[in-house]
Image: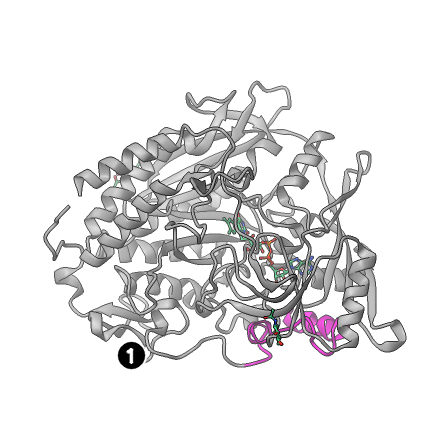
Amino acid sequence: MRKLLHVFKSTLIFLLFINEVISTPPEDPIKCLSKNTNCTITNANGIFPDRSTCKVGEVKYPTSEEELISVVASATKNKIKMKVATRFSHSIPKLVCPDGQKGLLISTNNLNKILKIDKEAKTMVVESGVTLREIISEAGKVGLALPYAPYWWGITIGGLMATGAHGSSLWGKGSAVHEYVVEIRIVSPSNPLDGYVKVRTLDEFDQDHLNAAKVSLGVLGVISQVTLKLESIFKRSITYLSKNDSDLGDELISFGRKHEFGDVTWYPSQRKAVYRIDDRVPINSNGDGLYDSIPFRPTLSAELAIVRTAEDIQEVKRDAKGKCDGAKLITSTLATFGYGLTNNGVFFGYPIVGFNNRMQSSGTCLDSLNDGLITACAWDSRIKGQFYHQTTFSIPLSVVKYFIEDVQKLVQLEPNSLCGLELNNGILMRYVTASSAYLGKTEDAVDFDITYYRSKDPLRPRLFEDILEEIEQIGLFKYKGLPHWGKNRNLGFVGVIKKYPNAEKFLKVKAEYDSVGLFSSEWTDQVLGLKEGVTILKDGCALEGLCICSQDSHCAPKYGYFCKPGRIFKDARVCAFHDVKKTEGQNVVKDEL
Ligand SMILES: Cc1cc2nc3c(=O)[nH]c(=O)nc-3n(C[C@H](O)[C@H](O)[C@H](O)COP(=O)(O)OP(=O)(O)OC[C@H]3O[C@@H](n4cnc5c(N)ncnc54)[C@H](O)[C@@H]3O)c2cc1C
Ligand SMILES: *[C@@H]1O[C@H](CO)[C@@H](O)[C@H](O)[C@H]1NC(C)=O
Ligand SMILES: *[C@@H]1O[C@H](CO)[C@@H](O)[C@H](O)[C@H]1NC(C)=O
């Protein structure tokens, strides 16, 4: 094991010095048997939560709004189910699948133009397939800034709005990009009198429709254009500060109110929290900072394979301690290299000061110039890399302290249980604010991003399966957390629509825009509460988050995992190892490495 750690460490260090922008761009999520027909689509991970991919009859690539209108009209006339697809398809759940095998995908890949920038009014009009990266960079060129945005820039404005994507802030209108959208043009099905298609322009004078369309899950039609309200470019100053986590529950709210762009990364098994102190500073402050997040850089496939193999072995051997050692190494390496922050290309310590457009989002692993998969994004499914589940929910500020304390109690019971999360850069906690969007956040909240090992074998449980499942159920059900629409396993969406007081208003607009439901699918109907069946009951379903276990077969009796109540949340039902106290956390197999 020592040797493995050593190899791991040297590759980890090596990777930090690959500074050239070479990498293999991600695979096209759409694959067709013949040109644009008989296709399948998945997401950027190459697989949906239920391990399916989905079949579609045809893909169209409109290059203008006129073409888009004629595509929607003709599909509506022929009663064909439709969905919008994007270049990389970064959402995890099955939002992009039209029902049946003959559906139509409308890709926004060629709807990628910046249409207008008004420096005076500080607005920008873009087609919906434009990526976050282009928006930030084109705005920056004329001295404008999108203040808050997701940290990963490989997503499109249409896709990120549909799922309510956000960065981190409690200030102003908060961190969700849709809060900065002032006008939307949307193309929806209509009746024969309208020529089967209707184009609507929604602005502030039509709050009802705008609030529905800002976060739409893609079920209202195709967003063609978006107008964003920007502000003048400004500089930020970032300092990461590491503290023990004993007062995290108390600190979290005041920290968020104090620092405009702050976030916190939590390493619960290391009992540590890293605070990103991130504030606006005067534009003449010194510094040419850059944030090029290390996990989003091109990563050596060989290194990814080593890391994955190490975790596969740790899982099989139930080597929790090994995971904890690996986690400490990764955590300290990231800290040593400033998490990817540099000033004039180097990192010598904090603060790092720079322009907002260079500090907010990154994702250099997307850069093309195909190197034949020597390096790639860590989750690229063509290589042996990250394969994970992601549970992401937001918990209202009013109760977030109790959620933190519940997780801390679980760590007290099982100190090594959350090292697996730390291997995936810990729990990222970001601030989001209540929104007027009908499917936006209902209260000011902290969003938790929890990423953990997923076996290639769906029937294989993970280490501390029970603790991870209990945290998921505590967040979603005890504190009624709102799942991120673009992440999560199926169980994240159990009863979700009941958590939204404005759901009825959303459904009314949906009925008006697409009365037949051509843009709806089984999955979106289930999520929106129009159909039963978000969860799927079968052997091992709880391991994949397809169900909450109610009998042992939903877990993995073969590996000693049975359906039990939670340890501190008694209403939880989790897959627990039969003799947790005695064996978990120890090497039961002799270390042969
Ligand atoms: C590495 C990584 C990092 C991430 N980081 C963050 C983060 O920091 N913050 C955050 O909040 N989220 C984050 N996410 C999640 C991400 O923001 C969402 O999954 C987002 O929806 C992906 O956008 P996309 O362009 O890939 O859209 P897709 O996933 O392709 O589409 C999402 C939905 O939008 C619909 N849609 C797309 N375009 C249109 C359109 N023009 N009109 C109508 N409907 C449309 C699609 O049909 C689908 O239903 C991250 C995801 C990954 C993989
Ligand atoms: C595509 O699918 C149709 C049926 O849906 C089938 O008739 C046709 O042969 C398929 N084409 C190819 C190239 O597989
Ligand atoms: C955590 O840090 C605080 C000071 O910030 C200190 O008082 C406390 O004893 C520390 N707790 C642990 C467990 O180290």
Label 1 neighbourhood size at 10 Å, few (<14), some (14-19), many (20+)? some
Where residue 522 sits, quadrant-wise, is bottom right
Q: Nearer the viewer, residue 518 or 372?
A: 372
What percent of the width, then of the height, locates residue 351? 47, 25
Q: Is residue 281 visible?
A: yes
Q: Residue at x 54, y 58 (%)?
A: 91
Which color scheme does this rendered protein use? one colour
Q: Is residue 202 visible?
A: no
Quick one: SS at disc 1? Answer: helix
Asked if the magenta segment contains residue 563, the reply would be no
Q: Type of residue at label 1?
A: Ser
- The magenta segment: 502-531
579 up-or-down from 347: above or below:
below
Side of 442 where 320 appears, left or right: left
220 up-or-down from 407: above or below:
below
Quadrant assignment for the C terminus:
top left
Q: Residue at x 80, y 59 (%)?
A: 67
Q: Residue at x 38, y 33 (%)?
A: 15
Q: Residue at x 27, y 40 (%)?
A: 328
What percent of the width, then of the height, locates residue 145? 67, 36
Q: Nearer the viewer, residue 531 or 441?
A: 531
Q: Which residue is mark 1?
A: 553
